[in-house]
Amino acid sequence: MNFNNVFLKSFRVVLLPFALLYGLGVIIRNWLYDKKYFKSIPFNFPLICIGNIVMGGTGKSPMVEYLIDLLHPEYKIGTLSRGYKRKTKGYLLATEKTTALDIGDESMQFHNKYPNVAVAVGEERLVAIPQLLQDRLDLDTIIMDDAFQHRQVAAGLNIVLTEYSNLYVHDFFFPTGDLRDQRASMKRANIIVVTKCPTDLWKDNQEKIIRLIEPLPHQKIFFTTINYGIPYHIVHKTERTIKNTDEVLLVCGIASPKPLKEYLLKYAYTYYQKNFNDHHIFTIDDFNDIKERFERIETTEKFIITTEKDAVRLAKFTEEIEQLPIYVLPIKHKFLFNEGEAFNQLVISFINSFSKPQHHE
C-alpha cells in the first residue's frame, strides 16, 4: 500500500466541506447561464473549443496540435488561450520576439511549432476574439484552448476530453475530487474524446465506457491513445531513440506524467525523475540541480528526457544546455478503432458550414 496515496485521499476527504461550497458555486453559475441571466455570446464564425471539466492534464494541447495538423494549410488557423502563468495581462498576439513569459508555455509551444498560425492569448475571450479577428483578417477558424468552462463565449463546436484512467463520471468537485465543473455540463459537448487509452483497448471496454458516459443523441464519442514520437535535442534538433540500455533522467513539470513514466519503464533500462510543479518556471538553480542529478548517473549510456511544454520553459538556458544531452519527447493523439477519419470529417464539416470569409491580402 502506498502511504502517500492513502494520506492524500484521506486529506481530500477532510476537504469535503470546501468541495461542497465550490460545487455549489459552480452549479449556481451554470444555472444562471442556462436560464439566460448570464449571456453566452455566439459568433458567426467557426469557433472550436477544446476543454475538459477536471483539474489536470487530459491532453488538450496535443489535441490543439492535432487540429492544426489536420486543418493546416487548407485553412488559416488561429489559437486563443488564457496564457497560464504568463507575466503579461490582456490580449497579446505572438510575434517573432515573443517568449514563454509573454504568452505562457503552451501557447509558446504552438508558436514555435507552427509559426504560420496566429497564436494569441487573452483572459477575456469575449474581448480577445474580435481583436484576433481584426489583427488577422484571413482567419478561417479559431481554436480555443481550455475554454469549455468559460461560458461568456458560445463556441460552435465543443470538443471535451476525459482521461481513460480518471473518467469524469466517477469524479467529485475539487478539492475532494478533480472536477472543476459539474458533470451535467458535459451535455454541452458536441464531441467527447476519451484520451490516454491503452493501445490494445478492447471493444468491450469501449462499449462499457460509452454506457457509463451515456452520450446524448447529438454527441459523438471517440477514443485516443498517446503516440510518442522520436526524441529530439532541445537545441540541435538531432534525434535519438530510446534503447533498452539507456538510463534516463526525466525532467517533468506537467499535470499528468504517469503515461510518460510507463513509456520510459517499457523502453529504457531505467529512469530517474526530477519533479517540478505543473507549468513551473525554471530558474538557473533548477537547471544546476538538473545537471548535478544527471552527472550522478554513473553509466555512459544516459541522457535527459523532457516534455515539449517543459522544453519551452528550459529554452532560455540555450548556452547552458547546448552541450548537455537534453532531448524532447513529442506526443500526439492517435485515434483507436479506425475512427480518426470520422472525427476529422466532423471538424471539417463544422468549419465548412460557415461561409468562408473573404481573405484580405
Image (tube, rainbow, N blue to C red):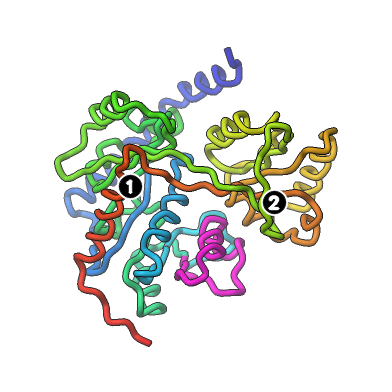
Left or right: residue 308 compared with residue 144: right
Left or right: residue 359 compared with residue 58: left
Instruction: Examine the image and state in which quarter residue 320 appears.
Output: bottom right
Q: Quadrant of the N terminus?
A: top right
The answer to which of 254 and 358 lies nearer the viewer is 358
According to the picture, the residue beneath numbered tag 1 turns out to be 340
Q: Residue at x 69, y 34 (%)?
A: 273
Q: Do we see residue 18 in this rendering?
A: no
Q: Which residues are magenta?
A: 91-120
Direction bottom: furthest residue = 361
For disc 2, the neighbor class at 10 Å (few under 14, some 14 to 19, many from 20) is: some
Check the image and report above or below for 285 versus 164: below
Is 250 within the magenta?
no
Direction left: furthest residue = 217
Q: Residue at x 22, y 69 (%)?
A: 44
Q: Residue at x 34, y 50 (%)?
A: 148
Image location (x, y in percent) of residue 26: 32, 41
Left or right: residue 321 compared with residue 87: right
Q: Amino acid at mark 1?
A: Gly
The answer to which of 155 and 294 lies nearer the viewer is 294
Q: Quadrant of the C terminus?
A: bottom left
Is 109 within the magenta?
yes
According to the picture, the residue beneath numbered tag 2 turns out to be 282
**Closer to the N terminus: mark 2 or mark 1?**
2
Give SS at disc 1.
Answer: helix
Q: Do we see residue 249 in this rendering?
A: yes
Q: Amino acid at mark 2?
A: Phe
The answer to which of 325 and 230 lies nearer the viewer is 230
Give SS at disc 2.
Answer: loop
